[in-house]
Amino acid sequence: MNLDERINIAERILTDFVEIIFEHVSEVDKDFSIEEHFLIELIGQRESATMSELASFFSTPPTTMTSIVNRLIEKGYLSRCRSEKDRRVVLISLSAKGEEYYRNHKQEYKGIFKKYLFNLSEEELKKTSQLLAKVKKALLNK
């Protein structure tokens, strides 16, 4: 198998995986856009972030990120607070309602992963985890 064929296979697998996640999000969360959902997920993993960090992560203009964050603040899922280290810095974090949403979805994702990964042997699961970690590292190093 040549490099182009391997890239095509990897691309198809990753696309299928992302489609499964998007499908799940759209089925469960009719009140949220995909961007809003993933913003909550990102902040849940990081605990807090600045607006510029969020805009950079999503490769979106700060004004667009501000409107997404404002919608989620209005819905009660996010909050703004000043950094303890530098009072000039405004941090975006999950509200209590946002934390509950994040925890619930984390459990749902675990259920999805169990469902799809159940048929893998321990060795296959280990290799899959190693491969995904390797792909993540390569993507982060660009």
Image (spheres, grey):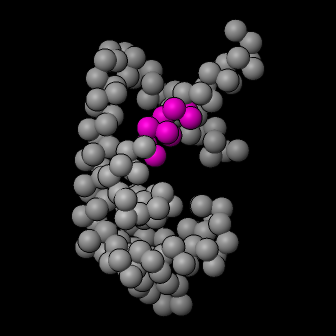
Q: Which residue sits at x=39%, y=23%?
A: 126
Q: Which residue sits at x=28%, y=23%?
A: 118
Considering depth in this image, is 130 or 106 the residue closer to the camera? 106
Q: Position of residue 140 (x, y in %)?
A: 62, 46
* Residue 33 as seen in the image, left or right of residue 53: left
Q: Quadrant of residue 8?
A: top right
Q: Which quadrant holds the C terminus? A: top right
Most extreme residue toward the top is: 1
Considering depth in this image, is 18 or 89 the residue closer to the camera? 18
Answer above or below: position of 66 versus 4: below
Q: Which residue sits at x=25%, y=73%?
A: 96
Indicate whether residue 32 is drawn in magenta: no
Most extreme residue toward the bottom is: 87
Q: Is residue 50 visible?
A: no
Q: Quadrant of residue 123?
A: top left
Q: Which residue sits at x=37%, y=22%?
A: 125
Q: Which quadrant holds the N terminus? A: top right
Q: Is residue 87 visible?
A: yes
Answer above or below: position of 94 versus 102: below
Provide the residue span drawn in magenta: 14-22
Q: Position of residue 16 (x, y in %)?
A: 51, 32
